[in-house]
Amino acid sequence: MRKICGYVKNIINKRYRANNLGLHCHCVETREKLLELLEKAKQENVGVLTINNYKSLKVYTQVLPLLLDKDIQEYRGIRLIPSIEMPANFNFTNLDGQNYNIEVHILGYGVDVEKEELLQQFCNVKYKSINQEDELQRLIKIGHQIGLNFNNEDAYLDLNDDNRKFAGRAFVQALMKNMEDNFCQENEENKNKLPFELRTNWRAFQNRCIKDLNSPFYLDMASLNPDVNEVIDLIHKMNGKAYLAHPSSYFAKIGTPNDIHKAFENVVKFAEDFIKEYSLKNNGKTCIDGVEVYHPSYLGNIEVTSEMKELVKQYRIGSSGGTDIHVDKTLSNDETVSSDSLGGNVTKKKIKKYRYLRKKTIEISKLRGKIIEINNRNTER
C-alpha cells in the first residue's frame, strides 16, 4: 500500500512540476478576453491561475458561465482560484520625513464567489470616486502650466472606446501626439519633459505621476479608499487570504541613480512599516496573510527582493508573486502570465508550496457548474 501511495504521490508531483503559476492576472470581463487570457496561460503551461480584477468577481460569476463546453474542454488543464484586488488607504512617512497617504492594493486569494453581494455592498459604501471629466481638465491645465505641447482636443478622441473612463489614459494619448516635445529619449534626463517610460506604458502615468507626491500631477487618490484594516477584514469575511500587492510599485524608480536607490530604500521601509502594523505578530485582530514578493515593479533588484523575503520570514507571513498581466484592449504580445523574468521565481515554484492555494484551486468546469447553480438559485428567489 505504501508503494502505491508513493507512486501516486510521485505522479501528482510530476504533474505540478510541469505547471507554472499565474498568481496575479487581470482580464476585461468578456468571454473573448477571458479566452484570450486562458489561451496565454495554456501556451505558458500554467496550471493554476488567479484573476484578480479590481473590486469585482464578475469575471467568475458572469463571464465564466458564458464559456462553452468546447472552451472548457480546451482549457481543462487550468485550475482557477477566485480572487480580487482591492485598493486601500495607508498612511506612510518616507525617509525624507514626508507623511502622506498611499493607495495600496490588497490581493484577496481564494475568496468565496457566493459572497459577491457582500463585496458589492462594501464597495458601494466604502469607496468614493472622482469625476473623470474634472480630472481630465485638471491634468490638461497642469500640462500647459509646465510647458507640455499638446492640443486639448486630442484628449477627447475615441469617445466610443471608453477612453475617458480613465482621465490619465486620455491625457497621455494627447501627449503622445508630440512624442519628441513631451517625453525624454531612453536614458535621457530632462526636467522639462516626462520620463521616457510613460510613453511606452500609459498605466505608469498613474503610479509615477498622479500618485507621486513630488509630481506636479499628484492627486491624493488614497483618501478615496477605505483603510487597510477594513479591506483585510472584508477579504477574511469572504473566506479569502489577504496579501499586500506589489509594494515596490508605490514608489517611482526614476531620475538619477541616487533617486532610484532612495526609491528602493523607501520600498523596504514601507513594506516593513506595513507588515509591522498588520502582521499577526503585532496585531491580533486585523492581520495580513502575506506579501507579493515577486513583481515586475522590483525591476530585478535582487537586494530588495532578498530584504522582502527576510521580512516575510521574520514576521511569519506568506509570499506570492505574479506578472500583473492586464488582458485588455491595449494588451501587447510580450505580456506574460508567468514569465520568470517579470513575475519572479515564485511563479516557477511547485503548487505544493502553496498549501492554502492548493486547497482553493477549482477546475474550470466545476467552478462554472457551481456558479451556474448559484445563479439559478438566486433567480428562483
Image: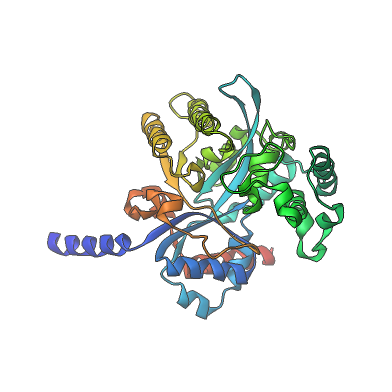
Instruction: Look at the picture and state if 142 lies above or below 114.
Output: above
Asked if 60 appears above or below 215 in the picture, the reply is below
Give 31 or 115, whichever is nearer the viewer: 31
Residue at left offset 55%, top offset 22%: 95
The image position of residue 256, as x and y in percent, is 55, 33
- x, y percent for residue 375: 63, 65
Q: Position of residue 102 (x, y in %)?
A: 63, 33
Image quarter in which the C terminus is found: bottom right
The percent position of residue 239, horizontal first and vertical second, equals: 51, 46
Residue 239 visible in the current orientation: no
Relative to 321, residue 17 above or below: below
Colouring convention used in this rendered image of the protein = rainbow
The image quadrant that residue 250 belongs to is top right
Q: Residue furthest bottom?
A: 70
**Residue at 68% over, 66% down:** 379
Residue pictured at 42% horizontal, 52% vertical: 341
Numbered marks: total: 0
Res 255 visible: yes
114, 246: nearer the viewer: 246
- Asked where in the image residue 148 lies, by quadrant, the reply is top right
Residue 71 falls left or right of residue 44 = right
From this viewpoint, which residue is outermost toward the top?
97
Image quarter in which the N terminus is found = bottom left
**Does residue 162 sit above or below 213 in this rendering?**
below
Q: Nearer the viewer, residue 93 or 274?
A: 93
